[in-house]
Amino acid sequence: MNLSACDELNKTLMLIVNPVAGRKLAQRKLAGMVRIFMENGYRVTTFITRRRGDGSVFSKNFGADYDLIVCVGGDGTLSETVAGALEGKVKTPIGYIPAGSSNDFAACHKIDLDIYTAAVNAARGTPKAVDAGCFNDRFFTYIAAFGAFSWLSYSTPQNLKNTFGRSAYIFDAMRDLTLIKPVHMRIDTGNKSYEGNYVFGAVSNVTGISGVLKLPEKDVVTDDGLFEVILVREPETIEEMGNVVTSIMNGDLKSEIIDYFHATKLSIETDESIDWSLDGEHAVSGKELRITVCKKAVKIIMDK
């Protein structure tokens, strides 16, 4: 390193690293990332996550003390970092270096997947305010989902993710497809109501999830205060199920058994508590649930 470049480290950076995400790239390239940040004038303090939830604790309790927060890991690491910042009312901009197995948020926002390039962009980029979501009193970054496919990110074993990447999610979905249980649900958006037996639902703000769900890019604007909502009704036949899975994977949401719309808030009632995925992390709702959009709630650095 050119020492003259480090004569004035007049900015502070909080680096949150998930060492086991993806193929453990963050762990192997940590020194190189720190070097890049120092060359851009940052004094770096590194926080290594050891268990689920650490990213939220770090950003919530310490994020306000830094000029920049950068998290390195998968979508779950980003989600934890953002949630902690929102819980702690931390206004520090957040940079994201994607090092996970799916990186849905990065794909939607064109964040570079090369770790060193993403580090340069995080150090030199411009923050953009984007929407987040609130699931009752819990924050999420880009998706809340239930039913088929929704659990893939947190139930698919890490070793399969590391070995097969996106394909691991599809393998896992095919294995357990027959276990899908329909959920009777009533949804009110304030403007319109929906009711039915649904096998899948997603409230999202990205163009694709884990390689198995695709949305039309023209529909997804990540700072407009609207989330895209997909609800798949219970198919009557195996053939119909196959057709709707194909439609979802190809971004064709015009099927008669798919309810697709935009909303700023959802009031949801179910007959029993159900499991949800918030950015790939497990959550459980009660029989009543409220999901709201937090417009432009968090500043994410997109590019240099």
Image (tube, helix red, strand yellow):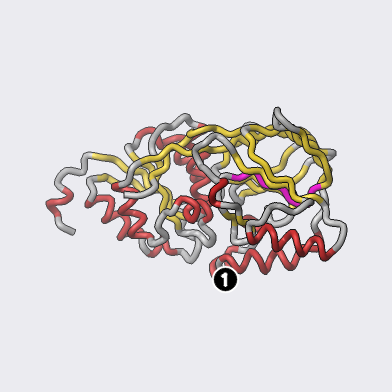
What secondary structure prevails in the magenta region?
A: strand
Q: Residue at x 38, y 62 (%)?
A: 114
Q: What's the amino acid at mark 1?
A: Phe
Comparing 92 with 49, the one in front is 92
Comparing 80 with 223, the one in front is: 223
Can residue 151 be seen here? The reply is no
Q: In the image, what residue occupies the spot 79% across and 51% down? A: 257
Q: In which quarter of the view is residue 10 placed?
A: top left
Label 1 packing within 10 angstroms: few (<14), some (14-19), many (20+): some
Q: Secondary structure at mark 1?
A: helix
State yes or no: residue 201 in magenta.
yes
Q: Which residue is identified by label 1?
A: 164
Q: Is residue 47 left or right of residue 76?
A: left
Q: Nearer the viewer, residue 27 or 150?
A: 150
Residue sitting at the far left: 4
Q: Residue at x 38, y 64 (%)?
A: 28
Q: Quadrant of the N terminus?
A: bottom left
Hey, which residue is sitting farthest right in the picture?
A: 236
Taking 223 as reference, is 272 left or right?
Answer: right
**What residue range appears in magenta?**
198-204
Give coordinates of residue 258: x percent, y percent: 74, 50
Residue 130 x %, y %: 47, 39
Of 134 and 258, nearer the camera is 258
Where does the image place residue 120, in percent across and percent down from the top left?
A: 30, 53
In the rendered image, residue 58, in percent from the top left (x then y), is placed at 45, 41
| Magenta highlight on residue 86 | no
Residue 168 is at least partly visible in this image:
yes
Q: Is the residue 94 above or below the residue 164 in the image?
A: above
